[in-house]
Amino acid sequence: MAMLSKLRYFRLLDDRGGRHALGDIAVALLKSDYPVVTDLLYRNSEGEQMMLPWRAVKGIDWRHAQINVSSFDSAQSVTKESLRKVVLLRRDVLDALVLDLHNRRATRANDLWLEEDNGKLLLKAADTSSLALLRRLSRGLFGGRPSHAAYDWKYIEFLRGDPHAVRNGAGYHMRIKRLPPGEIAGLCSSLPYLHAAELLTLLPDEIAADTLTAMLPDRQVQVFGELEDEQAVRLLARMRANDAANLLRRLTVESTKSFLTRLARSGLCCHNPSLPSK
């Protein structure tokens, strides 16, 4: 097992003596239960951000804290825009709120555990313990053993706190949709409202509508206000008439009128006769 808290301080070294500090690690979240590392991010001597594919890696020298690569010739420059579509362990996953779907709880990824397997490096678990924080503060000198709070990644969904991340093509497991709407609503109650809105956006509309209905009134309004208008209209149309009406009554007059107009134009509100009138 390798900890990100230790791996983040490694350097990349090629056969010609080229050396760069490892900046971040890209993973393919949706390819398997245990995401494989696809690229290594670093800055070249000109300060330009570069992405080196994992296939250039020859091996990891744990004793000397370095990753040996054949060369840096296959590295490509990347922009901030292109990096938005990539999942990076340090930037996106470390310290992120994660949902442990096996134990039905929300927690925070204080460290990440990776494992070498047949020339690949796989993301295996999220460590949520206080020991993981000690490990990070000590740069891996203390707390090197796996803790009891290391949760198997195949039961993990991580959230960025950005309801628009789903639309932008960010990677998610999508396993959350297997839970009953009432349990999902319970998880949402323990999350910041932006994370809860992001979680709702992960769900198919029919499940999202039932989950929104099951939320407490104040949280329901908070989450609904962060949804894109198109999705909000679709969920309103799928809710029972009384539930949709109760939600709309808690919005501002302007918002209520706007959604009623959108519903009418879409032709989706014909089965909701008790919605408040304009």
Image: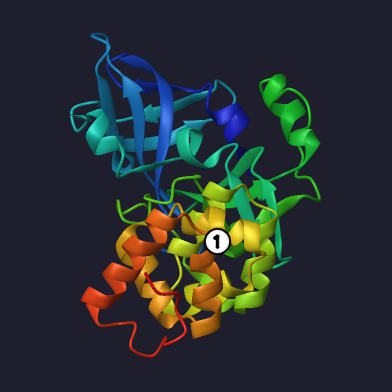
Pinpoint residue 39: horizontal percent, then vertical percent: 34, 39
In depth, the one of 60 and 94 nearer the eye is 94
Pinpoint residue 184: horizontal percent, then vertical percent: 62, 69
Pinpoint residue 197: horizontal percent, then vertical percent: 50, 56
Quadrant location, the N terminus? top right
In depth, the one of 134 and 57 nearer the eye is 134
Q: Work out whether 126 lies above or below 232.
A: above
Q: Secondary structure at mark 1?
A: loop
Q: Residue at x 70, y 54 (%)?
A: 190
Number of residues whose C-alpha sits closer than 10 Å to that of mark 1, classed few (under 14), some (14–19) or many (20 or more): some
Quadrant location, the C terminus? bottom left
Q: Work out whether 272 lies above or below 188.
A: below
Q: Which amino acid type corresponds to the residue marked 1 in the rendered image?
A: Arg
Q: Residue at x 30, y 74 (%)?
A: 263
Q: Work out whether 31 lies above or below 17.
A: below
In depth, the one of 262 and 85 nearer the eye is 262
Taking the image as shown, residue 227 lies to the left or right of residue 5, namely left
Q: Work out whether 216 lies above or below 24.
A: below
Mark 1 = which residue?
250
Q: Residue at x 79, y 34 (%)?
A: 131
In depth, the one of 34 and 160 nearer the eye is 160
